[in-house]
Image (cartoon, helix red, strand yellow):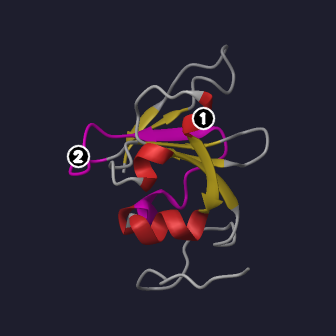
């Protein structure tokens, strides 16, 4: 069943629709801050995680809109290119963007702040 999200001020900033399936972990859904985001190169999937190690049964599939509603600060990553990731030390820390090292083991990482 479809549901409605409270959109961020200024409207929906992502190129993907708000109902696009995204990977997260149960920790984020239970209130842990998002500290790691990946925009996968091969399929454009979003991974929005707590930054800790996970077991397979910790992973959840939810819509991007629900994750942005939970953490509106994610809108600053709406322009994260395919194959890039972003991480931060805590919910109050700035995001650091880098070429996702897991996408192509041969590429060197480039960093830029957000």
Instruction: Pick out the residue farthest to the right.
Output: 43
* Residue at screen point 57% across, 31% down: 100
Q: x%, y% of residue 28?
A: 42, 50
Q: What element carries label 2?
A: loop
Q: Which sits in the foreground, 25 or 22? A: 25
Apparent side of residue 31 relative to residue 12 in the rendered image (left or right): left
Q: Earlier in the sequence, mark 2 or mark 1?
A: 1
Is disc 2 in contact with disc 1, using a CB cutoff of under 8 Å? Answer: no
Mark 1, secondary structure of its residue: helix
Report which residue position mark 1 lands on. 57
Q: Main secondary structure of the magenta part?
A: loop
Q: In the shown orientation, is residue 75 left or right of residue 80?
A: left
Residue 94 bears which disc, if any?
none
Badge 1: few (under 14), some or many (20 or more) residues near its Cα, within 10 Å? Answer: few
Instruction: Report the residue that reaches farthest toward the top.
Output: 106
| Disc nearest the viewer among 2 and 1 | 1
- Residue 75 painted magenta: yes
Q: Name the residue under label 2.
A: 93
Q: Which residue is drawn at 51% across and 24% down?
A: 109
Q: From the viewer's perspective, is residue 75 above or below residue 91?
A: below
- Extreme residue toward the left, this view: 92
Residues shaded magenta: 74-94
Query: Quarter holding the N terminus?
Result: bottom right
Q: In this view, does 88 lie to the left or right of 69?
A: left
Q: Residues within 10 Å of mark 2 (few under 14, many from 20)?
A: few
Which of the pair 29/48 is nearer the observer? 29
- Quadrant in the picture for residue 42: top right
Residue beneath the point at 48% across and 46% down: 26
Q: Height in image: 36 above or below 52?
A: below
Whole-percent x, y for residue 20 in the image = 70, 64
Q: Where is residue 34 in the image (x, y as percent from the top left)?
A: 39, 48
């Amino acid at each position: 069943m479809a549901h409605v999200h409270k959109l961020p001020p200024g409207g929906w900033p992502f190129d993907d629709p708000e109902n696009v399936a995204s990977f997260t972990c149960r920790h984020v859904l239970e209130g842990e801050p998002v500290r790691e985001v990946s925009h996968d190169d091969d399929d454009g999937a979003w991974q929005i995680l707590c930054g800790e190690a996970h077991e397979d049964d910790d992973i959840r599939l939810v819509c991007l809109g629900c994750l942005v509603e939970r953490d509106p600060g994610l809108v600053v990553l709406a322009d994260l290119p395919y194959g890039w990731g972003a991480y931060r030390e805590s919910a109050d820390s700035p995001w650091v963007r880098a070429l996702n090292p897991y996408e192509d083991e041969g590429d060197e990482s480039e960093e830029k702040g957000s």
